[in-house]
Amino acid sequence: MASIELKNITKTFDKHDVIKDLNLNIEDGSFTVLVGPSGCGKTTLLRMIAGLDPQTSGQVLVGGRDVSKTPPGQRGIAMVFQNYAIYPTMSVRENIEFGLKNNKVPKEERKELIESITETVGLKDYLDRKPSTLSGGQRQRVALARAMVKKPSVFLMDEPLSNLDAKLRVQMRIELIELHKKLGTTFVYVTHDQVEAMSMADKIVLMNRGVIQQEASPDEMYHIPANQFTAQFIGVPPMNITHMQHKHLTFGFRPESATIGREPQPGLLQTMGEILTREMLGSETIYQVKTPIDTFMIKSLDDQYKVNEQIYLSLPEEKIHFFDDQEKRIH
Ligand code: ATP
């Protein structure tokens, strides 16, 4: 197992700083998810940890050891990519065994390792199959097993589930959480999908334009966002944010924090509104509500309200977030 420390990391491509003086400590044994919009620098950061790209300046430490100049193969790190490269002509067993043979691991030891690892990832019955006869999820598990046989102290994963269909993705998320528990190894996982980050991470690192916006547990990210960017990145639909010019005040609330009804409701913010749109998603309904203050998105368990209907909207005081003119959360 190993912790990862990034110290004053900058990465410049074509005179453009893609990562700007970034500092990050990733705890030993944690499941850390790097999340952020496309192009924010997640993959670049992961590749620098792996040693696949050199940083322009700064240091990378793994398990307290400075590996800034250590080649990828000697960092004790395994990386699993979105396009998991497994060899199509080799069986599952041969795919997993390949790296072990290269490292001259004795035959008996290879056999034991493969058996225990394929047991862990649920591939034991598929050892003699060719990848073309496997499902997407099973192929993804072969890629994981191949990384696991190297017994790395850190796993880096770059959007490993994005080629899978929605249902399988949800299943593999649960399997990865289980795998992390079993191995106890440090996992660093990159995704642009905040739902994936919220459901898997014990710590989320949210990035934008090469700068960390917030590092926190999923709970804290949701309840105490550091700034407007975080507030709007985490949660679907995003937090409603309203800037009241004459009061120099910016406040926000989550679509699920407000209640709507046909009668006035108690709450700090109370207003009348008109339903502009209605999107029924099954267990919940998203309404767009026009009020004298602003137009808000409201998520409700009640699907009875119709477009053009006049309703009352209210919001409890503790659910309102306030932001300063630098977009930082005040309370
Ligand atoms: P995505 O979610 O779309 O994969 P990302 O957050 O992983 O995005 P990166 O791939 O790290 O983003 O890219 C960050 C920025 O660095 C982007 O603006 C990208 O265009 C730029 N970049 C990445 N690699 C190179 C390169 N080899 N040469 C020049 N610019 C690059």
Image (tube, rainbow, N blue to C red):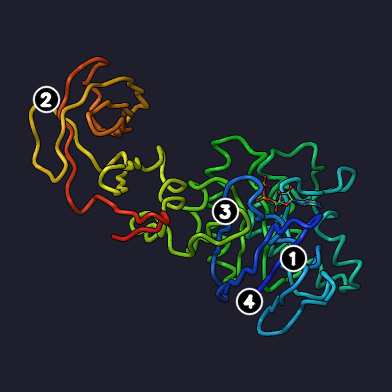
Which tag, 2 or 4, sits closer to the chain's start?
Answer: 4
Describe residue 218's horizontal placement relative to residue 108 as left or right: left
Q: Decide which of tag 1 and tag 4 comes sooner along the chain.
A: 4
Identify which amino acid the numbered label 2 is placed on.
Answer: Arg
Q: In the shown orientation, is residue 161 left or right of residue 198? A: right
Q: Nearer the viewer, residue 91 or 77?
A: 77
Residue 136 location (% of width, % of height): 69, 39
User: Which element is circle 3 on?
Assistant: strand
Query: Which label's residue is closer to the chain start, 3 or 1?
Result: 1
Is the Cβ of the residue at disc 2 closer than 8 Å to that at disc 4?
Answer: no
What element does badge 2 sit on? loop
Q: Position of residue 305 (x, y in %)?
A: 22, 21
**In the rendering, which numbered label is found on residue 5?**
4
Amino acid bearing label 3: Asn
Q: Residue furthest bottom?
A: 64
Q: Check disc 1 and report the residue beneath it.
A: 48
Amino acid tagged 1? Met
132 versus 45 height, above or below:
above
Q: Residue at x 68, y 74 (%)?
A: 153
The residue at the point 63 percent across, 58 percent down is 210
Cα–Cα span, label 2 and label 1 = 56 Å
